[in-house]
Image: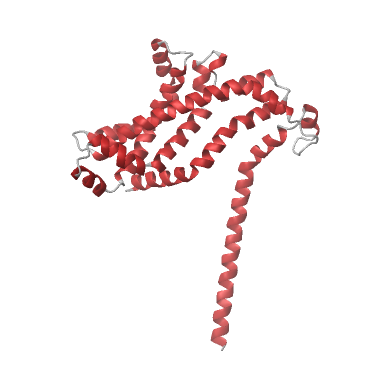
Amino acid sequence: MSADTATQSRLRSRRRRASASQSGVILALSVLAGVGLFPYLFMLLSSFKTNEQFYQNFWGLSLPLEFGNYAVAWQQVNPYLTTSLIVAAASTIGTIALGATSAYVLARYRFLGRNVLFAFVAVLMMIPNIASIIPLFVLVRDLGILNTYWVLIIPQVASGLVLAIILMKTFFEGVPQELFDAAKIDGASGPRLFRSILLPLSSPIIGTVALMTVISVWNDFFWPLLTISDDSLRTVPVGLSFFQGQNATEWGPLFAGYAISSIPLLLLFVFLSKWFLAGLQGGIAGVAK
């Protein structure tokens, strides 16, 4: 009887330790989530304030809410949103199209120098983007594409291709070869295999690359600032910086502009988060192998 009592006591002790450990993990994650979300909550609260409310109640919510701040911000941010949407859509389409084609060739075709070529692509990840700013600027200047959409799109596609090829290649290599062999027996050509078999199975990695490309384009500040002087072609980050200069004391409209500019990324992540996580896990698993 005493042995049973001792066993039950040990079990209860283990449950208490497990519960305490779980509570500690939940508390730590809650703190991290709170720290990460606090700036966004502060932005939303401040976007509904007048300047007087902002200085009187810096951290809290003030009534009445100034919804007119969003009307003012929308008039200022709307042109920049249009430019960012155009550049993000074109860059994403170009990165996915070129990245998927290149990754398919590297993953499914055997030719001399294939591994060396892929190694060169992987090495490009080690070169910081800032190191190529000057030669890239000289190149686009000589091409005469400053102050055009092309100067925003082409460099984004070129820089995004490196990671896109690596992730897509490792994902494509995980697709069973039997599917391709069966289609070849039926007479399917290489382009048909790519179009009808590989692409339909690659939604996760395509979603991953699309989301990463859009985030990169949407948050890029230095390159548009360097290459664009026409106000109608400025992207959201650059436009908001000029908006801040014009409204240095109008904090409500400024924070409302930040909130409006974050909505497209938020919606995109909500719709693509499942594919993003699945594709990223597939790409990492392929790299690990």
Which quarter of the figure has residue 105?
A: top left
Residue drawn at (60%, 29%) of the image: 261
Foreground of the two, 75 or 103: 75
**Residue occupying the far front of the picture:** 186
Which quarter of the figure has residue 116?
A: top left
Which quarter of the figure has residue 197?
A: top left
Q: Quadrant of the N terminus?
A: bottom right
The answer, for residue 109, to whether it is visible in the render is yes
Q: Is 132 displayed left or right of 270 in the figure?
A: left
Residue 86, how many percent across, how many down? 49, 24
The answer, for residue 221, to whether it is visible in the render is no
Foreground of the two, 195 or 253: 195
Residue 155, how many percent across, how many down? 42, 23
Q: Is 250 displayed left or right of 22 in the figure?
A: right
**Residue occupying the far bottom of the picture:** 1
Q: Is 60 displayed left or right of 278 in the figure?
A: right
Residue 47, how many percent across, how many down? 70, 32
Q: Is 85 displayed left or right of 251 in the figure?
A: left
Residue drawn at (55%, 23%) of the image: 82
Up-down relation of residue 27 to residue 162 (above or below): below
Residue 53, how many percent across, how many down? 79, 31
Q: How is the image coloured?
A: secondary structure
